[in-house]
Image (cartoon, rainbow, N blue to C red):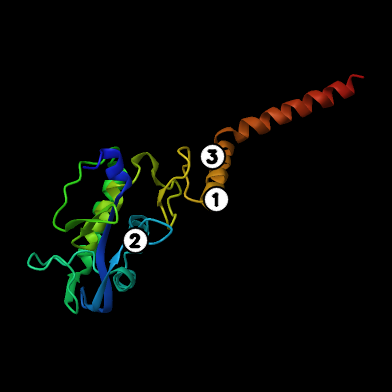
Amino acid sequence: MLTPTKSIRNFRFCTLAGVKEAALEGSNIVGRFRSELQEFYGPPRHKLIEEFLNWPDDNEGILRFTRKYGPVLEYDPLRPEPVSNGTFEFPVVGWKVNQQFFRDMWARMRRFPDWQPQGGTLAFRNGQLIYTAPNLYMFLYMDLVTSDTKRLRICKRPDCPNRYFIAGDLKQRFCSTTCAEWGQRELKKRWWNEHGEAWRAEKRRQKGSKDGSKKTR
Protein backbone atom coordinates (compact mmCIF):
# COMPACT_ATOMS: atom_id res chain seq x y z
CA MET A 1 0.00 0.00 0.00
CA LEU A 2 1.37 3.43 -0.96
CA THR A 3 1.95 5.98 1.77
CA PRO A 4 0.19 9.36 1.31
CA THR A 5 3.44 11.08 0.27
CA LYS A 6 4.28 8.44 -2.30
CA SER A 7 0.68 8.41 -3.51
CA ILE A 8 0.86 12.09 -4.41
CA ARG A 9 4.31 11.78 -5.97
CA ASN A 10 3.29 8.82 -8.15
CA PHE A 11 -0.18 10.00 -9.08
CA ARG A 12 -1.05 11.18 -12.59
CA PHE A 13 -4.30 11.87 -14.38
CA CYS A 14 -5.40 12.00 -17.98
CA THR A 15 -8.48 11.81 -20.18
CA LEU A 16 -9.20 10.30 -23.56
CA ALA A 17 -9.13 12.95 -26.28
CA GLY A 18 -8.98 13.46 -30.03
CA VAL A 19 -11.33 15.50 -32.21
CA LYS A 20 -11.74 14.67 -35.87
CA GLU A 21 -14.01 17.59 -36.73
CA ALA A 22 -16.09 20.30 -35.08
CA ALA A 23 -18.32 23.09 -36.36
CA LEU A 24 -20.60 25.81 -35.07
CA GLU A 25 -24.27 25.16 -35.86
CA GLY A 26 -26.50 27.89 -34.51
CA SER A 27 -25.86 28.17 -30.79
CA ASN A 28 -24.33 24.70 -30.53
CA ILE A 29 -21.01 23.14 -31.41
CA VAL A 30 -21.23 19.71 -32.99
CA GLY A 31 -18.45 17.36 -33.93
CA ARG A 32 -16.98 13.91 -34.00
CA PHE A 33 -14.19 12.18 -32.09
CA ARG A 34 -11.34 10.44 -33.86
CA SER A 35 -11.41 6.71 -34.40
CA GLU A 36 -8.35 6.32 -32.15
CA LEU A 37 -8.56 8.30 -28.94
CA GLN A 38 -5.35 8.99 -27.03
CA GLU A 39 -4.60 9.62 -23.38
CA PHE A 40 -4.16 13.34 -22.86
CA TYR A 41 -2.09 14.44 -19.83
CA GLY A 42 -2.19 18.17 -20.56
CA PRO A 43 0.13 20.58 -22.40
CA PRO A 44 3.86 19.91 -21.89
CA ARG A 45 4.90 23.25 -20.33
CA HIS A 46 1.83 24.59 -18.50
CA LYS A 47 -1.46 23.56 -16.97
CA LEU A 48 -4.51 23.29 -19.20
CA ILE A 49 -6.67 24.94 -16.53
CA GLU A 50 -4.67 28.17 -16.96
CA GLU A 51 -5.18 28.09 -20.71
CA PHE A 52 -8.88 27.30 -20.35
CA LEU A 53 -9.56 30.15 -17.91
CA ASN A 54 -7.79 32.65 -20.16
CA TRP A 55 -9.27 31.35 -23.41
CA PRO A 56 -11.50 33.82 -25.39
CA ASP A 57 -15.17 33.00 -24.82
CA ASP A 58 -16.52 34.18 -28.18
CA ASN A 59 -18.04 31.55 -30.50
CA GLU A 60 -14.97 31.24 -32.71
CA GLY A 61 -12.71 31.00 -29.67
CA ILE A 62 -14.79 28.20 -28.15
CA LEU A 63 -14.77 26.38 -31.48
CA ARG A 64 -10.96 26.63 -31.66
CA PHE A 65 -10.63 25.26 -28.13
CA THR A 66 -12.93 22.35 -28.99
CA ARG A 67 -10.99 21.48 -32.12
CA LYS A 68 -7.74 21.55 -30.17
CA TYR A 69 -8.76 19.79 -26.94
CA GLY A 70 -12.31 18.50 -27.33
CA PRO A 71 -15.66 19.28 -25.71
CA VAL A 72 -15.48 20.21 -22.04
CA LEU A 73 -18.81 18.58 -21.27
CA GLU A 74 -21.46 17.08 -23.52
CA TYR A 75 -24.52 17.45 -21.31
CA ASP A 76 -25.61 13.91 -22.16
CA PRO A 77 -25.97 11.81 -18.97
CA LEU A 78 -26.17 8.64 -21.07
CA ARG A 79 -22.77 9.30 -22.70
CA PRO A 80 -20.44 11.20 -20.36
CA GLU A 81 -17.22 9.91 -21.94
CA PRO A 82 -15.60 10.31 -25.38
CA VAL A 83 -16.31 7.43 -27.73
CA SER A 84 -14.24 6.47 -30.77
CA ASN A 85 -15.94 7.85 -33.90
CA GLY A 86 -18.72 9.09 -31.65
CA THR A 87 -20.43 12.41 -32.14
CA PHE A 88 -20.75 15.22 -29.61
CA GLU A 89 -22.85 18.34 -29.27
CA PHE A 90 -23.03 21.05 -26.65
CA PRO A 91 -24.38 24.61 -26.35
CA VAL A 92 -21.89 27.45 -26.53
CA VAL A 93 -23.42 28.99 -23.42
CA GLY A 94 -22.65 25.78 -21.51
CA TRP A 95 -18.93 26.20 -22.28
CA LYS A 96 -19.08 29.75 -20.91
CA VAL A 97 -20.85 28.57 -17.75
CA ASN A 98 -18.13 25.96 -17.18
CA GLN A 99 -15.38 28.52 -17.70
CA GLN A 100 -17.00 30.92 -15.23
CA PHE A 101 -17.45 28.11 -12.69
CA PHE A 102 -13.72 27.32 -12.74
CA ARG A 103 -12.81 31.02 -12.68
CA ASP A 104 -14.91 31.49 -9.55
CA MET A 105 -13.39 28.39 -8.00
CA TRP A 106 -9.87 29.68 -8.78
CA ALA A 107 -10.64 33.08 -7.25
CA ARG A 108 -12.26 31.97 -4.01
CA MET A 109 -10.45 28.79 -3.01
CA ARG A 110 -7.74 28.93 -0.38
CA ARG A 111 -7.99 25.22 0.27
CA PHE A 112 -9.51 22.85 -2.23
CA PRO A 113 -12.09 20.28 -1.11
CA ASP A 114 -11.24 16.61 -0.87
CA TRP A 115 -11.20 14.96 -4.26
CA GLN A 116 -14.54 13.41 -5.14
CA PRO A 117 -14.13 11.67 -8.51
CA GLN A 118 -17.20 11.38 -10.69
CA GLY A 119 -16.65 8.43 -12.98
CA GLY A 120 -13.41 7.46 -14.65
CA THR A 121 -11.01 4.66 -13.81
CA LEU A 122 -7.96 4.06 -11.62
CA ALA A 123 -5.09 1.80 -12.64
CA PHE A 124 -1.47 1.05 -11.61
CA ARG A 125 1.09 1.30 -14.42
CA ASN A 126 4.84 1.09 -13.94
CA GLY A 127 4.61 2.08 -10.30
CA GLN A 128 2.24 4.97 -10.95
CA LEU A 129 -1.40 5.39 -10.04
CA ILE A 130 -3.22 6.70 -13.13
CA TYR A 131 -6.65 8.26 -12.97
CA THR A 132 -8.40 8.46 -16.35
CA ALA A 133 -11.02 11.19 -16.09
CA PRO A 134 -14.29 10.47 -17.88
CA ASN A 135 -14.23 13.79 -19.76
CA LEU A 136 -12.34 17.05 -20.15
CA TYR A 137 -14.45 18.73 -17.48
CA MET A 138 -13.24 16.29 -14.83
CA PHE A 139 -9.69 16.61 -16.16
CA LEU A 140 -9.85 20.39 -15.70
CA TYR A 141 -11.21 19.89 -12.19
CA MET A 142 -8.26 17.63 -11.37
CA ASP A 143 -5.86 20.12 -12.97
CA LEU A 144 -7.16 22.80 -10.62
CA VAL A 145 -7.42 20.90 -7.34
CA THR A 146 -3.90 19.49 -7.71
CA SER A 147 -2.50 23.04 -8.00
CA ASP A 148 -0.80 24.85 -5.14
CA THR A 149 -3.55 27.17 -3.88
CA LYS A 150 -0.98 29.63 -2.49
CA ARG A 151 0.25 30.31 -6.02
CA LEU A 152 -3.09 30.86 -7.78
CA ARG A 153 -3.22 34.46 -8.95
CA ILE A 154 -5.40 36.86 -10.91
CA CYS A 155 -3.28 39.51 -12.61
CA LYS A 156 -3.83 43.00 -11.17
CA ARG A 157 -3.96 44.52 -14.63
CA PRO A 158 -7.73 44.68 -15.41
CA ASP A 159 -7.41 44.30 -19.19
CA CYS A 160 -4.78 41.55 -19.09
CA PRO A 161 -5.62 38.79 -21.62
CA ASN A 162 -4.00 36.15 -19.39
CA ARG A 163 -5.26 37.18 -15.97
CA TYR A 164 -5.32 33.70 -14.44
CA PHE A 165 -1.83 32.41 -13.73
CA ILE A 166 0.22 30.32 -11.33
CA ALA A 167 2.86 32.45 -9.63
CA GLY A 168 6.47 31.35 -9.57
CA ASP A 169 7.09 33.73 -6.66
CA LEU A 170 4.64 34.03 -3.76
CA LYS A 171 5.01 37.84 -3.90
CA GLN A 172 4.09 37.97 -7.56
CA ARG A 173 1.03 40.14 -8.36
CA PHE A 174 1.30 40.40 -12.15
CA CYS A 175 1.44 37.62 -14.72
CA SER A 176 4.28 39.06 -16.80
CA THR A 177 6.92 41.77 -17.06
CA THR A 178 4.63 43.76 -19.36
CA CYS A 179 1.83 43.81 -16.78
CA ALA A 180 4.30 44.52 -13.96
CA GLU A 181 5.59 47.57 -15.85
CA TRP A 182 1.99 48.71 -16.31
CA GLY A 183 1.55 48.36 -12.55
CA GLN A 184 4.61 50.55 -11.91
CA ARG A 185 3.27 53.22 -14.25
CA GLU A 186 -0.12 53.15 -12.54
CA LEU A 187 1.54 53.40 -9.14
CA LYS A 188 3.53 56.47 -10.24
CA LYS A 189 0.44 58.00 -11.81
CA ARG A 190 -1.54 57.49 -8.59
CA TRP A 191 1.28 59.02 -6.55
CA TRP A 192 1.39 62.09 -8.78
CA ASN A 193 -2.39 62.48 -8.60
CA GLU A 194 -2.30 62.33 -4.80
CA HIS A 195 0.97 64.09 -3.99
CA GLY A 196 2.09 65.87 -7.17
CA GLU A 197 0.70 69.28 -6.31
CA ALA A 198 2.23 69.20 -2.83
CA TRP A 199 5.58 68.11 -4.30
CA ARG A 200 5.54 70.95 -6.86
CA ALA A 201 4.56 73.44 -4.17
CA GLU A 202 7.47 72.31 -2.01
CA LYS A 203 9.85 72.65 -4.97
CA ARG A 204 8.58 76.20 -5.61
CA ARG A 205 9.04 77.05 -1.94
CA GLN A 206 12.60 75.70 -1.95
CA LYS A 207 13.39 77.62 -5.15
CA GLY A 208 11.93 80.79 -3.64
CA SER A 209 14.04 80.37 -0.51
CA LYS A 210 17.20 79.99 -2.58
CA ASP A 211 16.37 83.04 -4.70
CA GLY A 212 15.65 85.07 -1.55
CA SER A 213 18.97 84.07 -0.05
CA LYS A 214 20.81 85.22 -3.16
CA LYS A 215 19.15 88.67 -3.07
CA THR A 216 20.15 89.33 0.53
CA ARG A 217 23.82 88.73 -0.14
* Number of numbered tags placed on the structure image: 3
Q: Quadrant of residue 19?
A: bottom left
**Quadrant housing residue 138:** bottom left
Q: Which residue is mark 1?
A: 177
Residue bearing the label numbered 2: 42
Image spot of residue 44 (x, y percent): 41, 61
Between disc 2 and disc 1, whose residue precedes? 2
Q: Which residue is at the front of the view, 97 or 87?
A: 87
Viewer-side residue, 135 vs 181:
135
Cβ–Cβ under 8 Å for marks 2 and 3: no
Which x, y percent locates residue 126? 29, 56
Q: Nearer the viewer, mark 3 or mark 1?
A: 1
Three-letter amino acid code at the position of disc 2: Gly
Q: CA distance from mark 3 to mark 1?
A: 20 Å
Q: Crowdedness of circle 3 by 10 Å Cα count: few (<14), some, many (20+)? A: few
Kindly give the residue lying farthest to the right in the view shown.
217
**What residue would you read off at disc 3?**
190
Q: Can you give x and y, in whole percent of width and height, for residue 204 in the image?
A: 73, 30
Query: Separation of disc 2 and disc 3 at Cα?
Result: 41 Å
Sequence-wise, the earlier of marks 2 and 3 is 2
Three-letter amino acid code at the position of disc 3: Arg
Q: Nearer the viewer, mark 2 or mark 1?
A: 2
Residue type beneath disc 1: Thr
Q: Decide which of tag 3 and tag 1 comes sooner along the chain.
A: 1
Instruction: Tell me if residue 97 can be seen.
Output: no
- Labels 2, 3: front one: 2
Q: Secondary structure at mark 1?
A: helix
State whether residue 41 is above or below residue 59.
above
Q: Is residue 71 visible?
A: yes
Q: Is residue 111 above or below residue 116?
A: above
